[in-house]
């Protein structure tokens, strides 16, 4: 009956699938797993409390928030827009690659942006669409949609593959904390350095994919113009 | 110097606890929030666990966490009145400050990295860098302390309950580990993965992270389970470097996030925001990259971890 211990995973799967409250789901999953493996309520709460307190490090990024909040108030996003607007003559692919690069850079400096509402909708997509119009003239609705999808994807690539390059990111601290709990004492700086390799590879691949996309568009619209 | 690290970190935790309690007081007083008691309690409990977690019996923290779970389950934690950003103020400030507005963020990273190379280590570095960067930001922007407190409260409330999720998932990992969940998974996997075969172990770890993340929609949650169940027995215990394997496993999980509608914030939200015709358009655009990246992760882990 060892399998019954997986009940916690099942609870998490079902809970996330039905979009129940995440924190409650996690606690219920932990409690059920503890109970089926023979722990008492008292032992469970002690273990949960101890594990949470000992992992406070994972949430130390809260200390970076006051500075980030102030920077936001005093024009962080506005200045980013000013800088982007200075660059002209870009194809959609090149522009989207540039955004991925900037997004990775922001990740390296620990800026936690919720990029889709803040950047992709108001800035990245409109500018990529403008670049397409400027380069190829009118484009089809289908290609417009593809540019939208790429704009959104560039945010996810930049965010996911570069966030762990910052040593105070929740991801790095979770890797550190989990490995430590499993008996591996490692340094968080070495985790961030390893993550940097992934970030660079992801950037190169995005650039390549966007370059191919540009080429496809160029071919298509050149042919249409020629006819 | 190393013997002072726990004390210095404890100081930072107390600081976080105090900031959290400040947000609690603001929430309790906020008449506009219909869940002000619950929201205030959430931040108060969090503040107490951060500031006094080491002084109280652990069982108290555990029960307090369960109270937080009940509060969030009944939707009693909500963002109340916070100091909203002012677009015009931002624009004016961007014109006068220019790119200096990025300086505190850059400074934060530099100081944190520099200290990580000293005996004090990266964690102390983050704390020290946060304080230095905040002071510099206040000098550059000439913001009075009240504005700094307002913005701290705004950021804390907007990070909200999801902010403690990674820490809670780390705790979940500890409970799973103690209960032997990892062993059950590794026994199941060992039927498929030939023992001692490093490449098979690496593939199982990376794909396990990706698939589990796709199902759960959350790489952090997958990480604790899959690392204990697959990573440790099939990669680390075969001599794999934990830093290399662990770091790559996390981003292997993110490859899964790119592929799943379960990660609504990342894949469904932009479809709505950008008014796209194809509801799966973002996932389709990401799929080739995700698949190439997972292959690269397997190769990197196999080559670099051993």
Image (spheres, coloured by chain):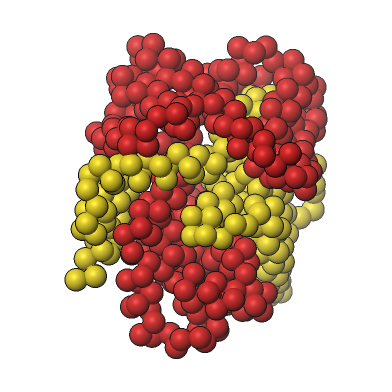
Chain colours: A yellow, B red
Residue A60, compared with residue B182, is above or below; it is above
On the question of residue B285 being in view, the answer is: no
Q: Position of residue B283 (x, y in %)?
A: 47, 63
- What residue lies at 30% left-to-right and 42% top-to-bottom? A45
Q: How many marks?
A: 0
Left or right, A220 with reference to B132: left
Left or right, B306 with reference to B226: right
Of A74 and A188, nearer the camera is A188
Q: Position of residue B144 (x, y in %)?
A: 67, 12
Toward the front, the furthest residue is: B3
Quarter of the image that includes the C terminus of chain A = bottom right
Of A58 and B95, nearer the camera is A58
- What residue lies at 29% left-to-right and 46% top-to-bottom? A44
- What residue lies at 64% left-to-right and 13% top-to-bottom? B145
Quadrant housing residue B100: top right
- What residue lies at 50% left-to-right and 39% top-to-bottom? A56
On the question of residue A111 being in view, the answer is: yes
Of B7 and A224, nearer the camera is B7
Of B148 and B83, nearer the camera is B148
Q: Position of residue B60 (x, y in %)?
A: 33, 32
Residue A24, compared with residue B258, is above or below; it is above
Quarter of the image that includes the N terminus of chain A = bottom left
Q: Position of residue A203 (x, y in %)?
A: 69, 62
Residue B12, compared with residue A163, is above or below; it is above
């Amino acid at each position: 009956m060892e399998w019954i211990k997986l009940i916690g995973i099942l609870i998490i799967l079902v809970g996330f699938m039905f979009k129940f409250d995440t924190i409650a789901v996690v606690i219920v999953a932990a409690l059920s797993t503890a109970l089926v493996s023979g722990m008492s309520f008292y032992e469970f709460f002690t273990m949960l409390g101890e594990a949470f307190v000992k992992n406070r490090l994972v949430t130390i990024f809260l200390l970076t928030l006051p500075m980030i909040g102030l920077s936001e108030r005093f024009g962080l996003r506005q200045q980013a827009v000013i800088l982007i607007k200075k660059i002209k003559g870009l194809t959609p692919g090149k522009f989207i690659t540039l955004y991925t690069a900037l997004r990775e850079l922001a990740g390296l400096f620990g800026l936690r942006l919720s990029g889709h509402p803040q950047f992709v909708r108001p800035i990245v997509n409109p500018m990529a669409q403008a670049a397409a119009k400027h380069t190829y003239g009118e484009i089809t609705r289908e290609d417009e949609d593809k540019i939208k999808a790429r704009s959104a994807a560039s945010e996810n690539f930049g965010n996911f593959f570069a966030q762990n390059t910052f040593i105070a990111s929740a991801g790095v601290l979770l890797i550190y904390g989990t490995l430590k709990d499993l008996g591996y004492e490692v340094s968080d700086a070495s985790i961030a350095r390893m993550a940097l390799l992934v970030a660079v590879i992801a950037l190169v691949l995005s650039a390549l994919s966007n370059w191919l996309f540009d080429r496809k568009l160029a071919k298509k619209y050149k042919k249409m113009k020629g006819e | 110097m190393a013997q002072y690290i726990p004390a210095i970190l404890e100081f930072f935790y107390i600081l976080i606890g105090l900031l959290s309690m400040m947000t609690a007081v603001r929430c309790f007083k906020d008449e506009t929030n219909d869940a002000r008691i619950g929201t205030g309690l959430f931040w108060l409990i969090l503040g107490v666990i951060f500031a006094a977690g080491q002084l109280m019996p652990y069982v108290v923290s555990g029960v307090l966490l369960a109270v937080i779970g009940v509060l969030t389950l009944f939707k009693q934690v909500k963002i109340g009145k916070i100091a909203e950003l002012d677009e015009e103020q931002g624009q004016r400030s961007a014109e006068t400050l220019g790119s200096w507005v990025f300086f505190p963020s850059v400074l934060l990273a530099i100081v944190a990295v520099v200290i990580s190379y000293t005996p004090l280590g990266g964690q102390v570095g983050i704390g020290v860098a946060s304080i230095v960067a905040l002071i510099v930001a206040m000098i550059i922007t000439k913001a009075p302390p009240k504005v700094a407190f307002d913005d701290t409260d705004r950021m804390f409330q907007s990070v909200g309950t999801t902010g403690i999720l990674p820490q809670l998932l780390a705790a979940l990992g500890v409970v799973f580990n103690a209960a032997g969940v990892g062993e059950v998974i590794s026994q199941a996997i060992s039927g498929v993965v030939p023992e001692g075969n490093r490449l098979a172990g690496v593939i199982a770890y990376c794909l396990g992270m990706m698939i589990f993340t796709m199902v759960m929609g959350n790489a952090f949650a997958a990480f604790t389970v899959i690392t204990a169940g697959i990573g440790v027995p099939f990669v680390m215990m075969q001599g794999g470097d934990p830093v290399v394997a662990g770091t790559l496993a996390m981003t292997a999980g993110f490859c899964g996030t790119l592929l799943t509608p379960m990660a609504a914030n990342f894949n469904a939200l932009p479809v709505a925001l950008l008014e796209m015709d194809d509801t799966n358009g973002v996932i389709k655009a990401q799929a080739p990259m995700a698949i190439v990246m997972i292959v690269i992760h397997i190769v990197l882990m196999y080559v670099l971890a051993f």
